[in-house]
Image (cartoon, rainbow, N blue to C red):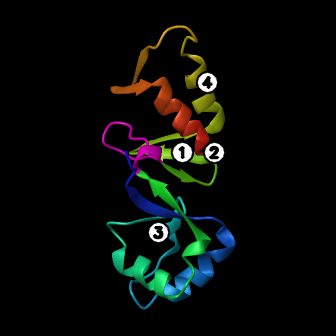
Amino acid sequence: MKQRIIGYKLKDEKYIDAVAILIKSMVDFNKSVFKNLTLCVYNNPDSLDLLSKAGVMHWFEPVKEKEMVRVGRYTPEKIQDIIKFGCQEFNKSEVEAIYRLFDKEINALLKIEGQIITKEMVEKLLKMF
C-alpha cells in the first residue's frame, strides 16, 4: 500500500528565510507556518508549486500519512523542545514518562485527559523530538 504524502518538512531551519522570500508573493508569509517546519499539502498548494518551480524541493522531505500521529482530533506539532496538541504541551521527559507507563508484555491503552493513548502513538511522539 502506497503512503500518501500529506506535507513537506523542511530539512534544515537555515532555509526558512529563503523559503519565506520565495513564497512571500503567494501568501502573507509568517514564520509561524513553520512551527513544526512542515508545509501541509492541502493548505499550501500554491506555495508548494512555487517552491517546486524554484527547484528547492530538495530542501524538504515528504511527510507521509502513516508517519503522522493524531491525539484525539489533534495532530501534534513540535515547537522547539515541546510537543503540542490542542491546549496540551509535553516536553520530552514527560512523553518518556508516559511511555514508561506501558507494560512491555501487555498491549494496553492509556486514557489521559479523556484521550485514548496507545504505546504506538507515544513511540511516534518520541520520534518527533
Mark 1 neighbour density, 10 Å: few (under 14) some (14–19) many (20 or more)? many
| Residue 97 disc label | 4
Label 2 vs label 1: CA separation? 8 Å
In the displayed structure image, the side of residue 10 where residue 67 appears, left or right: left
User: Which sits earlier in the primary sequence, circle 1 or circle 3?
Assistant: 3
The residue labelled by disc 2 is: 129
In the displayed structure image, the side of residue 25 where residue 97 appears, left or right: right
Question: In which image quadrant can residue 59 be found?
Answer: bottom right
The reply to whether discs 3 and 4 touch (Cβ–Cβ < 8 Å) is no
Q: Is residue 69 magenta?
A: yes
Label 1 vs label 3: CA separation? 16 Å
Q: Look at 47% across and 32% down and name the residue there.
A: 121
Q: Nearer the viewer, residue 26 or 86?
A: 26
Amino acid tagged 4:
Ala
Question: In which image quadrant can residue 7 be found?
Answer: bottom left
The reply to whether discs 2 and 4 touch (Cβ–Cβ < 8 Å) is no
User: Which sits earlier in the primary sequence, circle 3 or circle 4?
Assistant: 3
The residue labelled by disc 1 is: 83
